[in-house]
Image: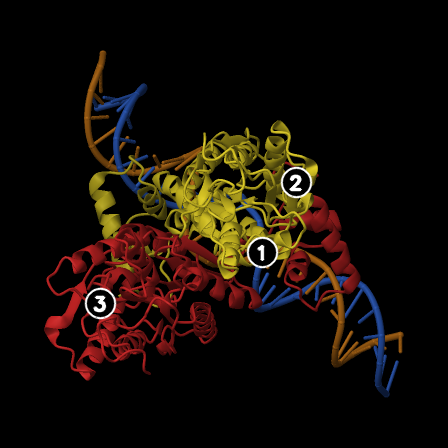
Chain colours: A yellow, B red, C blue, D orange
DNA sequence: TTGATTTATTGGAACGTTCCATTTATAGGA
DNA sequence: TCCTATAAATGGAACGTTCCAATAAATCAA
């Protein structure tokens, strides 16, 4: 089974008694080949244990069938879901997406992008690492390889982005808290170097403005976008003189951290302090108490991003429109009314 | 910036006024080149926006610098952690791992493996999808590409596997439950087509035997390895006449499902029913109640797998030894004593 | 039968690299 | 000065494909 040195198209040609061109045609499923010849060739392919050399083929074929997905944190189930959504549509299109993780490290991201370019990817879907410099994609754009940003965008960049309506989601969630009677509100986690952060915080402030919450009653605590970060945020916020009674968190991970910190203090999320998350990861529903969160349809955004990418490749363009995904607030147990408020549960 | 048609080594040569061979040497960091020449060439590379064509290079260079990681379920944070562990060591070695997800689908896995082979990977680290046929890797082995299994192994295969000591972990956990006074024990989730399942169940039964638990008091419920599966398992188990008072779960996802189902019934894990998970994902610690689980050092296993792979590539072999990782039981709140037992909390 | 048309098949020239065998330039020793 | 040794740079032949233009075989119309 299979000779030592790897078989090429010529070995197959010899084995089947045809020319290399014929073998190539069969490999591409050309209709020009007489069926019986094709069968003969295919048998030879089996016999010699041939594996197609896509590198060699790409040397002639202009573009490849691989698309790169560069993701900033695979450990976050949120991004894993995104990846899965994309894969679904790529699979149907016969493209194989290769995923790489940058672990939120711009240097690593640079390496990964370089490697993918060298590999000759047809396109790149990227969720950029925090701190990515605007110039990081200049060379890739110059090379004419289409890029789409997913979930995150870069401050000043003409690269199309697929992202949820962060501002509206945050606004919705904040309104919800205010309607529950909360008047001293916090925004927990994230940092201002992320566009997403600015959008979400913007929505929070917009709602505060709309309901005339005094600036003094808005507590904003930046922090890591992780459980640990969330725990720290709560501690910081409760230490101030007139602490908030409710918080919108940058994402669900932060929210889980906040809930954990509450429990450690003997407080209960929902009754003693209202918590709302963002992203609505699968876990949110199963937490105790179940987490109120802004659902962003992660897998759907992944599919959308993949579609945009395919279209860009097909039409050989490097431009496309941004896409803003609809969001909705999923109210669960973690966002109860303010205990000291007269307003109560209404609305 | 960057001409339209993509630049090649020859364009650089022309630009820098040297031969293509010189450029190639510079690209490989050869010491044979006079430093000033190298500088000149590197400048030209920048100027023309050159991107290295690894496909073309691999045509001559025997083998590439990319390693494929084929993972059965990226959504499971457990596997994401594994991937991250591997990436750490590959990065240090200057190899870029490309990850692909098979979504637990053998057909998809076949496509993914084929695609990676065509791409000319130097090696493959695989966590095989459920239902993988033993022959799936025959061609890859025949082609001389090293393969390592991570976390899962195949029934009859000479491919080296890196996996935790499942049997011992299950045994440890079961002993713990028995020492807590439980006498009617369950094993929840998973299915017998997985080697891992057989090992974990084996450990469970071994401990049962050691403590002379009657066969009638052992409840084994197969099911999906997800929260949903766990919920179903509990329902099934509680429906029988003498239901178990404790369960070892196939993995943490199942355990979370069991805890959720308990809460829905108004029962509390730890006090009303003891639950032990397997894998000790990050979430386990933060759950409420915190989940007792068997820690397997996921990232460590990932690193180990990556090291084995690098060694195989280096020594051009396709064989290596299996690796069995140490496990330990992390006792938290979910595994309280049996309420009706005299034995109590001792040990 | 002959020429035109269609259907199958085929050689050969790319594609962008690497690497070996040479050539050319530089320096050192007599 | 010439010869040799070393250092630096180079041309050309691969590598495994694709694709164009060309050939060969089969079919058809006259």
Q: Residue under label 1, please give it.
A: A229
Q: Quadrant of residue B42?
A: bottom right
Q: Residues within 10 Å of mark 1 (few under 14, many from 20)?
A: many
Residue B247 drawn at (x, y percent): 25, 67
- Say what secondary structure mark 3 lies in: loop
Q: Residue B55, can we see it?
A: no
* Viewer-nearest residue: A170 or B250: A170
Q: Residue at x 37, y 38 (%)?
A: A93
Evaluate whether label 1 is on the same chain as label 3.
Answer: no
Residue B113 x %, y %: 35, 56
Secondary structure beneath label 2: helix
Mark before the other along the chain sequence, 2 or 1: 2
Q: Specify whether A77 is left or right of B142.
A: right
Instruction: Classify residue A197 by image quadrant.
Output: top right
Q: Which mark is residue B245?
A: 3
Q: Give the alpha-carbon distance from disc 2 to disc 1, as whole Å.
A: 22 Å
- Which residue is the site of mark 2? A217
Quadrant showing the C terminus of chain A: top left
**Quadrant (top left/top right/bottom left/bottom right) for the N terminus of chain A:** bottom left
Q: Position of residue C11 (x, y in %)?
A: 40, 46
D7 is higher (above) or lower (below) than B140: below
The quarter of the picture where residue B159 lies is bottom left
């Amino acid at each position: 089974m299979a000779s030592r040195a790897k078989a090429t198209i010529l070995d197959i040609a010899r084995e089947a008694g045809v020319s290399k061109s014929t073998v190539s045609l069969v490999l591409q499923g050309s209709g020009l080949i007489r069926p019986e010849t094709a069968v003969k060739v295919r048998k030879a392919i089996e016999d010699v244990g041939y594996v197609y050399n896509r590198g060699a083929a790409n040397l002639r074929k202009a573009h490849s069938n691989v698309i790169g997905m560069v993701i900033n944190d695979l450990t976050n189930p949120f991004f894993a879901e995104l990846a899965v959504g994309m894969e679904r549509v790529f699979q149907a299109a016969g493209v194989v997406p290769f995923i790489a993780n940058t672990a939120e490290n711009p240097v690593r991201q640079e390496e990964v992008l370089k490697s993918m370019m060298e590999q000759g990817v047809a396109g790149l879907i990227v969720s950029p690492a925090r701190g990515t410099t605007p110039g990081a994609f200049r060379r890739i754009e110059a090379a004419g390889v289409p890029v789409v940003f997913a979930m995150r965008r870069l401050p000043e960049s003409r690269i199309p982005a697929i992202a949820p309506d962060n501002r509206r989601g945050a606004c919705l969630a904040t309104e919800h808290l205010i309607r529950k009677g909360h008047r001293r509100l916090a925004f927990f986690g994230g940092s201002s170097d992320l566009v997403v952060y600015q959008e979400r915080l913007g929505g929070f402030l917009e709602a505060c403005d709309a309901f005339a919450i005094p600036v003094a009653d808005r507590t904003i605590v930046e922090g890591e976008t992780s459980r640990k970060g969330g725990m720290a945020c709560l501690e910081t916020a409760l230490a101030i003189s007139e602490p908030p009674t409710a918080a919108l968190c940058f994402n669900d991970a932060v929210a889980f951290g906040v809930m954990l910190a509450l429990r450690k203090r003997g407080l209960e999320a929902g009754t003693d302090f209202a918590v709302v998350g963002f992203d609505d990861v699968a876990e949110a529903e199963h937490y105790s108490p179940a987490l109120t969160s802004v659902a962003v349809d992660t897998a759907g955004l992944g599919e959308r991003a993949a579609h945009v990418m395919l279209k860009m490749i097909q039409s050989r363009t490097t431009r496309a429109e941004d896409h803003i995904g609809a969001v909705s607030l999923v109210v669960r147990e973690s966002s109860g009314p303010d205990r000291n408020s007269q307003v109560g549960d209404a609305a």
